[in-house]
Image (cartoon, rainbow, N blue to C red):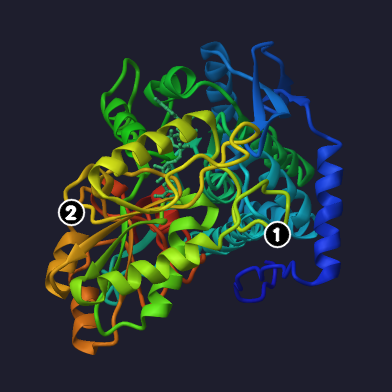
Amino acid sequence: MINLLPFKNEPFTDFTDERNAQAMQQALENVEAQLGRDYPLIIGGQRVESGMLHTSVNPSKFTQVIGRVHHATREHADQAIAAAWKAFATWQHVPAEQRANYLHKACALMRRRKNEFNAWLVLEVGKSWAEAEADTAEAIDFMEFYARQAVRYAEPQPLTTTPLPFETNELKYIPLGVGIVIPPWNFPLAILAGMAAAAVATGNTVILKPSDDSPVIAAKFMELMEEVSLPPGVMNFLPGDGPTVGEYMVEHPKTRFISFTGSMAVGLRINELAAKPREGQIWIKRVVAEMGGKDTIVVDETADLDEAAAGIVASAFGYSGQKCSACSRAVIVESVYDQVIEKVRERASKLSVGPAKDFGNFTGPVSSQRSYEKVNKYIEIGKTEGRVVLGGGRHELADEGWFVPPTVIADVAPKARLAQEEIFGPVLAIVKAKDVDDALSIANNTIYGLTGAFYSSDRERIERAKRDFHVGNLYINRKCTGALVDVHPFGGFNMSGTDSKAGGRDYLGLFLQAKSIAEKL
Ligand code: NAD
């Protein structure tokens, strides 16, 4: 039994300290010297080259190749699933403390090499230094937290206080089997590490299929798993096309569960495909799907308007609005509407957007050509649905990277597309509400329910918002992004997903099944 200190969130590095900035600069140079390499599949501990190479580029400078990953075929998927089942035969019986120990070791290594992971995040997905640091710190938090929780789930579980006189009774949590882990590109380290760590800490084995926009960071995570000597086959690495190899694994009769984070469209598709039993399948697949949002910040006339504007700008434009929790709508009551818009415009107009590796830039590009086109399409829609208060034009570096200037569109109708659909870019829609009741009803008028924030100084209204604002993660008088592991268990309502509450005490239950055993005395 290892003696551990209580869980504590990983502190963020302060890059305004010159020594820290220099260390990060050095890490960027070291990582840049490693760009352009090829990364194989990893199946049952063996490196496999398919020869079908997928190239990942720097969104701040799309001529720069970050690396190339070998893409898997369906045959590779069959092999990976078989390797994972083979490893499961022993891994499921490894004591929880031992399994947890692999993750503790991985955390120790990642802590020492934080800047290296940060640098990969800056270069492959265009995170600013601060956002990269938050991603790496969250990856560490997830691994540390789930390692501890896995040990708790393995302890004897409480049952009745009035046992039957002629029986002993116990309840044990046992793993499910082989799972497919499908993360998004926007938290390519934290969410990937979190979903994979939760699965293996609880005794499952997995196939990790990274996003095509962030496969090199995923490969770096796999290298870390190899460094801590995670047994072969426990975590298999299978980059590949989502709709082909991803779906094939979702439909596979030997897949026991799917742990997905990504868009609503893909999540619903996975849920539908997984629901249908296939030839030879002997279980109902479990699907955990955390999906998109249309996250709203409500501001009433009693709120501290400067604080509210700061919260809106940070939530809407941090990482260029590419967080599932990003504020993409501000709903403001009429009497302070113009004032808040002006404060938001003023703050947002000062944000510098440019290459993510330059520390001076508040935010970098959007992640891909696909995102760039989608965001610009919504900006055009916004021009017809509202009044452009800021942005809406082309960024001066748009020929080099997928940069989009912060864009604010006011006077958007509550049911307009800009107020209803997830954009996933630096575009904020502002909606006018008659009063606080109207504002709360607008806040609840989408199909989503992920995060939201409510700015007010009126106690009765705050209590009403706590009761009526229907989102999985509600914040009062603060921004709606920045959930911390163990502090803000994360997951959404409605079409935002299965409300798994990642980073919370109940999360690991999703990777386990309970076995009740009664023995007659
Ligand atoms: P996406 O749905 O396009 O892709 C997610 C993953 O699914 C990728 O690995 C992709 O390769 C894979 N995939 C795509 N099609 C597939 C298919 N048919 N079958 C199996 N796998 C398939 O999402 P994205 O663009 O990577 O990420 C952005 C989305 O993720 C946004 O909607 C955002 O809100 C959401 N997100 C949600 C949370 C949350 O916790 N709720 C967190 C982060 C991101």
Q: Is residue 141 left or right of residue 360?
A: left
- Residue drawn at x 67%, y 48% as measured from the top left: 356
Disc 1 residue lies near ligand 1 with CB under 8 A: no
Q: Residue 184, image x and y in percent?
A: 49, 40
Disc 2 residue lies near ligand 1 with CB under 8 A: no
Quadrant including the N terminus = bottom right
- How many C-alpha atoms fall within 10 Å of the one at disc 2: few (<14), some, or many (≥20)? many
**398 or 518, nearer to the observer:** 398
Snapshot quadrant of residue 37: top right
**207 or 457, nearer to the observer:** 457
Tag 1 secondary structure? loop
Q: Is residue 115 visible?
A: yes
Tag 2 secondary structure? loop
Q: Which residue is mark 2?
A: 414
Q: Residue 508, image x and y in percent?
A: 45, 55
In 3D space, how far apart are the residues under numbered discs 1 and 2 (Cα atoms)?
A: 36 Å
Q: Residue 18, image x and y in percent?
A: 84, 69
Q: Which residue is mark 1?
A: 360
Q: Is residue 195 left or right of residue 110?
A: left
